[in-house]
Every structure is written in C-alpha cells, then in structure tokens.
Image: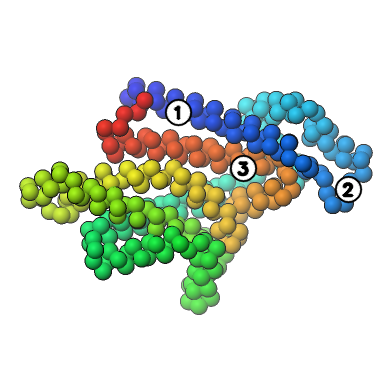
C-alpha cells in the first residue's frame, strides 16, 4: 500500500468517525426531544416506581448530562443496557443478531453481482435481439416486484408446491436460499440494467473500434477492454446498494423468521428502547460509511485516471 493511499484511507476513516459522531448526536437528541418516554405506558406506572426506573437509567438528568455520559461510555465501547431486555447489554444483543443480518446481506450482495453483471454484459452483447429483450424484461420485473410479494411467491412454489426448500428459519444452507434470493432479486436486476447501458456506451468508444480493427475476438474485447471500464457506474450504485440491502433485509428477516436485527430494531422503536435504537443506528451508519470508503478505493483500481486525495 502506497503512502498516498494510506494517507487517503486514514483521512476517510477520520471523516467516517465524524459522520458517526454526528449521527449518534442527532439520533440521541431526537429520541430525547420527541414527546413520550420509554416508560410511558397505557397503564401508567406509580410515580415513585417510574422515578426510580428513570433514575436507574439516568433519564432524570439534564439532556446534556445524559449526552456526555452516553458519549463517554461510547468511547469505551459501552452501548448501555436495553430497557426492554432488562440488564442485557446492547453489545450482547448486537453480537447475537448482527452476524445473521450481515450474513444475509453479504450473501445477497454476492448473488446480486454474480447474476447482475453477467446478465448485463450478455444483454449488451445481444443488443436489440430477443435475448436482450427477455433479459431486460426480466430485470424490469425484478426491479418492480417488492420483496414482500416475491417472498410469499417463492415460499408457495419452492416450499409448499415443490417441497424442496424450508419456508423459514435460519438453521443451515438450505434455509438460506429463499431469503437470500428474495433479498438479492432487486439489486441484481438494477445491476443488470446499469451494466448493460454502461457496456453499450463503452462498446461504441473509439478504442474499442481500434481493438476490433486489430482483429481481437469479441470475447477478449468484451471481458478485457469493455467490462472493467463499464463497472464504474455499478460501483457508484454499490454504496447506496449496501444500505438498501441491509435495511431491506428487515422485511426479509421478519417473513423468513431469520434471527437478525430486524425484530429488535422494530421492537426498540415501538418500545422507545433508546440504547438499542442508538446501537442499531450506529451499526448501520458505520456499515454504510465503510461501504462508501471501499467503493471509493475500488474507483481508483477500475479507473486509474481517478486520483484519491
């Protein structure tokens, strides 16, 4: 790794830290400013009981004191304890559920690229043919169909009609297939469309005409000279794609009963479980920031004209 690249990475990591601190601050303040509290229930607690609970979690202190205490604890890697799961550290909840959510999202991303890029290249190479039209109609269908519709259709067909895949849970490779496919359908379709249009742009360039004039085969031209330059728009889409896949996985996790973060995040919002909301928000913010950093680094690899600074 060159000195310039190391400097750039450290600079971006510093910026990422600032972004995460800003997000933590805004989330913290919004939770405190919004009306209602984590222990305001339909059946009101006796005032002395509520006061004792709020004192236990430092909720009776001024907001700036609560904020400083939270940030100091955060610096030490302490995300606090859940209000819903009494006495349970947020780090334990994240350690138990985050790997499953990341596994689901990572597999879906891999499937998306493995299907989307070859499909886009294939469609571009068969431009304006029946194969191109079928591929693009399939891609448009994939973009249009929401996950909550794709999931029951797949369960109905593969689990109840063919009886070859389990309809839910997360207990082994055969359980992974349906949720991963459901989550990967839309990103794969978007990548296929982006790749096709990008390949069509590059394939009309002067240097590609020169390569053809030299007698290079279409396969060599396509995969050696066209594909690498065509992946820049796909990379641009990859940063937001990671966020979309991670947040979109919540619906998939609920439908397929995957023991990920979805259940805890949704319950934490409805229960006003401040530490859990903050913890999950920070995790997803960090994932998004790191994904964008990796995308920026890949830019320089795929297009040396792009300088990292």
Specify the label residue 22 is tagged with.
none
**N-term-proximal mark, 1 vs 3:** 1
The residue carrying mark 3 is: 280
Q: Nearer the viewer, residue 305 or 163?
A: 305
Q: Quadrant of the C terminus?
A: top left
Residue 6's place in the image compared with 224, above or below, is above
Residue 166, given in percent of the width and then of the height, sits at 53, 68
Position of 214 with respect to 278 (left or right) is: left
Look at the picture and state if 267 lies above or below 123: above
Where does residue 10 sit, x and y in percent of width and height?
Answer: 44, 25
Residue 230 lies left or right of residue 54; in this view the side is: left
Are the residues flagged by discs 2 and 3 in contact, CB closer than 8 Å? no
**Residue 174 makes an appearance in the image:** no
Per the model, the C-alpha gap separating discs 1 and 3 is 22 Å
Label 2 neighbour load within 10 Å: few <14, some 14-19, many 20+ = few
- Cβ–Cβ under 8 Å for marks 1 and 2: no
Q: Residues within 10 Å of mark 3 (few under 14, many from 20)?
A: many
Q: Name the residue carrying label 2.
A: 44
Front one among 230 and 73: 230
Q: Could you tell me if residue 205 is visible in this image? A: yes
For mark 3, give the secondary structure.
helix
Which one is earlier in the sequence, the residue at label 2 or at label 3? 2
The residue beneath circle 1 is 12
Q: Nearer the viewer, mark 2 or mark 3?
A: 2
Rendered view: 81 above or below 264 = above
Quadrant of the rendering where the N terminus is positioned: top left
Q: Residues within 10 Å of mark 1 (few under 14, many from 20)?
A: some
Q: What's the colour scheme? A: rainbow
Question: Residue at image x 43%, y 59%?
Answer: 143
Q: What element does badge 1 sit on?
A: helix
Q: Do callouts 1 and 3 mark residues in contact (Cβ within 8 Å)?
A: no
Horizontal arrangement in the rendering, residue 210 relative to residue 58 (left or right)? left
């Amino acid at each position: 790794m060159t000195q310039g690249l190391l400097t750039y990475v450290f600079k971006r990591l510093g910026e990422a830290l600032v972004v995460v601190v800003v997000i933590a601050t805004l989330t913290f303040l919004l939770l405190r400013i919004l009306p209602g509290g984590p222990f305001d229930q339909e059946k009101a607690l006796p005032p002395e009981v509520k006061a004792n609970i709020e004192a236990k979690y430092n909720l009776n202190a001024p907001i700036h004191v609560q904020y400083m205490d939270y940030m100091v604890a955060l610096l030490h890697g302490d995300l606090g304890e859940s209000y819903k799961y009494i006495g349970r550290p947020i780090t334990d909840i994240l350690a138990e559920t985050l790997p499953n959510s990341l596994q689901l999202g990572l597999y879906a991303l891999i499937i998306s690229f493995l299907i989307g890029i070859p499909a886009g290249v294939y469609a571009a190479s068969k431009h304006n043919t029946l194969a191109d039209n079928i591929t693009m109609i399939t891609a448009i269908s994939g973009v249009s169909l929401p996950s909550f519709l794709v999931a029951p259709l797949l369960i109905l067909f593969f689990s109840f009609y063919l009886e070859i895949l389990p309809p839910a849970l997360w207990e082994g490779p055969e359980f992974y297939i349906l949720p991963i496919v459901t989550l990967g359908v839309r990103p794969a379709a978007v990548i296929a469309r982006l790749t096709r249009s990008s390949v069509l742009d590059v394939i009309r360039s002067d240097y590609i005409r020169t390569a053809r004039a030299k007698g290079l085969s279409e396969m060599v031209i396509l995969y050696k000279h066209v594909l690498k330059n065509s992946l820049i728009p796909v990379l641009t889409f990859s940063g937001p794609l990671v966020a979309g896949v991670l947040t979109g996985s919540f619906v998939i996790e609920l439908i397929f009963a995957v023991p990920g973060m979805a259940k805890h995040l949704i319950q934490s919002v409805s229960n006003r479980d401040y530490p859990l909301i903050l913890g999950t928000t920070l995790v997803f913010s960090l994932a998004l920031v790191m994904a964008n950093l990796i995308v920026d680094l890949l830019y320089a690899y795929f297009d040396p004209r792009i300088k990292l600074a």
